[in-house]
Image: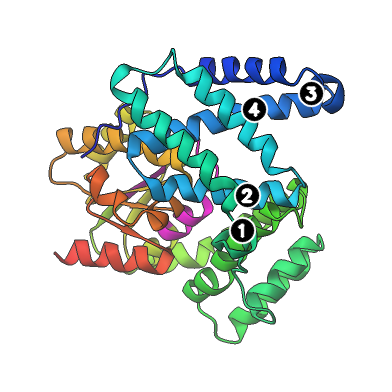
């Protein structure tokens, strides 16, 4: 696999230097934006450095393009002109000159120049980030509308009605919860909902899902297949519902699962995989930085538990279809249904 060890580059120092260059070039920023907006600008610079450098480490043009598209949709929705981002990229390129190892300098410089060239040519409306994730008039749309209206009780009743009409718990996950969560993220990206609405809707979905746990786990006790799966999200990952849903559905199919969330130290994860005698470890990463953290973790798992199967999922692996293999995983899936099929295939093999 590729060298994806934790970067030697001090990304925070590069971002701080780049931000200082930006302020020197545009001294009116402080008075024009104010302290809060200026702090967000500084944080954005840190994100840009991290994403650009991790795209270089993973050698993934696809993930770089995806990040640029994400920025375009986000910034267009917030009426931030292209030149603002391009100025940040130019400052980053300048700050990198004295800080990047010689072996990386030329390739990273080319990558930043590519980003500067590509960004103004991206059409936000043509990107997957802009496309609806649910069909208008679908049950998922009605469910999400209730949540965005702040009516958790109505959303819960709606799901209960669907279950009473014969929709299985599995189908609720695949047809209601999964697409509504994806659409929720898109609406936030487009600036059509605010962060409070996004957090409320996600929390409600997690709560509603939890109300089905007694029935799910009661059924699972009668169908144990002796298989075990351990699941964890990449360090810093905030999008965990998808992976949690995979483990829930596998429990229903007789698997014993352990869901650990994000930021689990590698040694602790490996020890638990060994103690659990896990057959499969599932790892997820939504965005590029998280994906770059999984390479060293997969290497460590392989070194200490060579018979273990390792699968990965999340947007990063959908965008770059070859990334899972480059990181040394046994496979990847685009969604919950794909993950269930992948797990079944590995278990049967």
**Foreground of the two, 91 or 145:** 91
Distance of mark 4 from mark 2, alpha carbons?
Answer: 17 Å
How far apart are labels 1 and 2 at the CA level? Answer: 8 Å
Mark 1 or mark 2, earlier in chain: 2
Front tag of 4 and 3: 3
Are the residues tagged 4 and 1 within 8 Å (C-beta)?
A: no
Q: Residue at x 34, y 33 (%)?
A: 57
The magenta stretch is: 230-247
22 shown above or below 222: above
N-terminal of the two: label 4 or label 3?
A: 3
Quadrant of the rendered image containing residue 151: bottom right
Is label 2 in a helix, a strand or a loop? helix
Name the residue that disc number 3 marks: 29
First-in-chain label (4 vs 1) = 4
Q: Is residue 304 above or below residue 27?
A: below
Task: Give the Cα separation between the discs numbered 4 and 3.
Answer: 15 Å
Q: Residue at x 58, y 14 (%)?
A: 17
Tag count: 4
Q: Which residue corresponds to mark 1?
A: 123
Up/down of 160 relative to 37, above or below: below
Above or below 57: residue 249: below
Disc 4 designates what residue? 43
What residue sits right under mark 2 in the picture?
72
Mark 2 and mark 3: span between their CA atoms? Answer: 21 Å
Numbered disc in front, either 4 or 1? 1
Placement of the C terminus among the 4 image quadrants: bottom left
Label 4 element class: helix
**Around disc 4, counting alpha carbons within 10 Å, would you say few (fewer than 14), some (14 to 19), or many (20 or more)?**
some
């Amino acid at each position: 696999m590729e060298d994806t060890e934790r970067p030697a580059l001090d990304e925070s120092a590069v971002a701080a230097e780049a931000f200082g260059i930006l302020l020197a070039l545009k001294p009116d920023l402080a008075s024009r934006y104010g302290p809060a907006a200026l702090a967000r600008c500084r944080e954005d610079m840190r994100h840009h450095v991290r994403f650009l450098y991790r795209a270089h480490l993973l050698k993934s043009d696809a993930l770089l393009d995806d990040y640029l598209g994400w920025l375009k949709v986000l910034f267009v929705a917030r009426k931030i002109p292209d030149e603002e981002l391009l100025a940040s990229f130019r400052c980053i390129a300048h700050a990198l000159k004295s800080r990047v190892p010689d072996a990386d300098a030329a390739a990273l410089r080319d990558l930043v120049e590519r980003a500067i060239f590509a960004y103004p040519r991206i059409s936000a409306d043509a990107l997957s980030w802009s496309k609806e994730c649910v069909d208008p008039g679908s049950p998922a749309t009605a469910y999400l509308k209730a949540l965005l209206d702040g009516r958790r009780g109505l959303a819960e009743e709606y799901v209960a009605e669907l279950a009473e009409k014969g929709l299985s718990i599995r189908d609720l996950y695949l047809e209601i919860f999964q697409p509504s969560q994806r659409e929720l993220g898109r609406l936030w990206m487009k600036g059509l909902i605010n962060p409070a609405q996004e957090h409320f809707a996600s929390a409600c979905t997690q709560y509603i899902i939890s109300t089905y746990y007694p029935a799910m786990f009661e059924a699972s006790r009668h169908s144990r297949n002796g298989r075990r799966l351990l699941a964890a999200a990449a360090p810093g990952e905030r999008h965990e519902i998808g992976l949690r849903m995979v483990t829930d559905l596998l429990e229903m199919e007789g698997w014993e699962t352990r869901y650990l969330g994000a930021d689990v130290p590698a040694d602790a994860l490996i020890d638990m995989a060994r103690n659990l005698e896990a057959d499969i470890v599932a790892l997820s990463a939504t965005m590029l930085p998280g994906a770059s953290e999984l390479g060293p973790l997969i290497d460590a798992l392989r070194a200490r538990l060579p018979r273990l199967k390792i699968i990965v999922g999340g947007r990063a692996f959908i965008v770059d279809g070859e990334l899972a293999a480059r990181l040394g995983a046994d496979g990847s899936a685009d969604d919950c249904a794909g993950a269930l099929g992948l797990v079944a295939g590995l278990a049967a093999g």
